[in-house]
Amino acid sequence: MAEAVRYTVRLTAHFERDLDRIEAFLWDTEAYTAFDALLNELSDTVIPNLERFPHMGRVFLARPAHSVEVSNGIENLNAQFNSIANEGDQLREYVLENYLLLYAKIDTVIYLLSIRHHRQLSFNLTSHWPS
């Protein structure tokens, strides 16, 4: 019987910066134990699952765009990804209870690209408002 392929999970520098931002966000919201819980979930559940089942997340670029801006962003992301990807490689998203994780499956390596808490804003608007 053929041996199952074992995938390697690697964190990107961007993913590590996202973790720093999440830690700061959770600290600001006084959710002091939530960051440790996230790290435990990543190490005990998410990473082992992705090592065994890299296709468990949904295909990221398969969702329809509902605006011109999103459509343009998806086209740009798709072009960038296709310039480094091989046949069968995919950008996928893994939905956790409070987080959305973006990862790339390239050959037998899973790259954790980005992670966001569902309550984190994509924009930092504090500098736009008068003091």
Image (cartoon, rainbow, N blue to C red):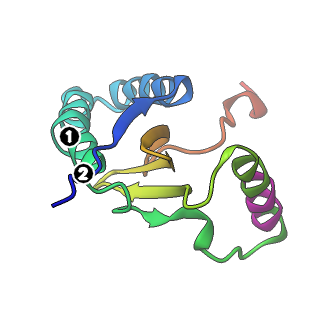
Q: Quadrant of residue 130?
A: top right
Mark linked to residue 1: none
Looking at the picture, tell me which residue is in the foreground, 72 or 107. Answer: 107
- State the residue at coordinates (46%, 24%): 16
Q: Which quadrant of the figure contains the N terminus?
A: bottom left
Say left or right for 12 vs 37: right
Whether 22 is among the magenta residues is no
Residue that numbered label 1 is attached to? 41
Q: Amino acid at mark 1?
A: Glu
Q: Residues within 10 Å of mark 1 (few under 14, many from 20)?
A: few
The boundaries of the magenta stretch are 70-77
**Precedes in sequence: disc 2 or disc 1:** 1
Callout 2 crowding tier (Cα within 10 Å): few <14, some 14–19, many ≥20 = some
**Dot in front, 2 or 1:** 2
Give, as a three-letter code, the residue at label 2: Arg
Q: For the residues marked 2 and 1, what is the alpha-carbon distance in whole angstroms?
A: 16 Å
Q: Residue at x 75, y 64 (%)?
A: 70
**What is the chief secondary structure element of the magenta stretch?**
helix
Q: Secondary structure beneath disc 1?
A: helix
The correct choice, above or below, for 88 with respect to 80 in the image is: below
Q: In the rendered view of the protein, which quadrant contains the C terminus?
A: top right
| Rendered location of residue 45, percent (x, y) | 18, 45
55 versus 28 height, above or below: below
Q: Residue at x 21, y 57 (%)?
A: 2
Relative depth, front residue between 1 and 30? 1
Relative to 82, residue 120 above or below: above
State the residue in front, 84 or 94: 84
Within the magenta stretch, is there residue 73? yes
Q: Position of residue 67 (x, y in %)?
A: 78, 72
